[in-house]
Amino acid sequence: MSEMLKIDNIRKVFNPGTINEKVALDGVNLTLEEGEFVTVIGGNGAGKSTTLNAVAGVWPVDSGKIYIGGDDVTKLSEHRRAQYLGRVFQDPMTGTATTMSIEENMAIAARRGKARGLSWGITKAEREKYREMLATLNLGLEDRLTSKVGLLSGGQRQAITLLMASIQKPKLLLLDEHTAALDPKTAAKVLEISDKIIAENHLTAMMVTHNMRDAIAHGNRLIMMHEGKVILNIAGEEKKKLTVQDLLAQFEKVSGEEFANDKALLS
């Protein structure tokens, strides 16, 4: 198996030298093998989303290296890194163009980085492909290709964003609390769709979540962060047998303090 993501000792300090100085990432090391699906959990300010943003190139790290598919992307801008990545954000409004139709959104995602823009129109073959992809979601969206995305519910939008993020089979799929804004039933459905898309496309994925149950139930490895460091890394059989109580106990043992985030326990 080859390494799809390697995070090598990255550090990030916000507002250095000021009264608001915050060490967000304090020597983070993490490797994802091809096809791994890792869930990342931690309290507020633990460094979960900061790590994801570092990988995506939202801002430069202060030190350390980031490799995607063996390429050193540490110095690449967010725009240049986009070719490696699929991303789904917390806000269902972020990943789609709301005034455009479902099929137009999917065509933009499919043609990203290619010379052929939307001006050529959508071919019958493309439309059929999008219809088939949408049908796998079981949300009835395959019959609404020309509907404006802005008219859809948050869960429907996130499902379409997942399809769009994976349509070009990125080297790495980043899911940043992508179900946090949804009601529990819809969140469960979107997580089920996420599992399906990752498995069927053999994607390597990293999902940040506040919800311990979700972190345990999904993916094949669980990472827990605290104060800008990875403090737990649980995989295989051990992860399958995990309970929320186990995870809390391990957190307290490693960090020497209680897990202070009620939201993580709610589900």
Image (spheres, rainbow, N blue to C red):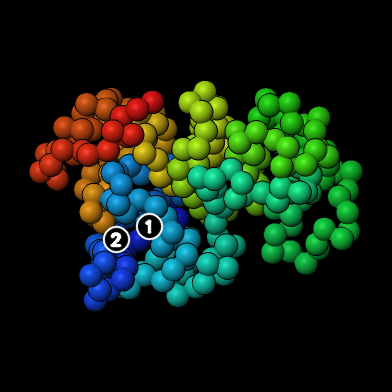
Using residue 101 as the reference point, say whether residue 95 is left or right of it: left
Mark 2 Cα within 10 Å, few/some/many (few <14, many 20+)?
many
**Vertical arrangement, residue 163 with respect to residue 214, above or below:** below
Q: Quadrant of residue 245?
A: top left
**Residue 27, percent from left and from top:** 25, 63
Whether residue 195 is visible to the viewer of this picture, yes or no, is: no
Residue 31: % across, % down: 35, 54
On residue 24, the disc is 2
Quarter of the figure with the C terminus: top left
Q: Which mark is residue 12?
A: none
Q: State the image coordinates of residue 24 (x, y, percent, origin top left).
A: 29, 61
Q: Nearer the viewer, residue 6 or 11?
A: 11
Of the numbered discs 2 and 1, the one sitting upstream in the chain is 2
Is disc 1 surrounded by few (<14), some (14 to 19) or many (20+) residues within 10 Å? some
Q: Is residue 107 visible?
A: yes
Q: CA distance from mark 2 to mark 1?
A: 7 Å
Q: Is residue 57 left or right of residue 251?
A: right
Residue at image mark 1: 50
Residue 76 locus on image (x, y percent): 49, 73
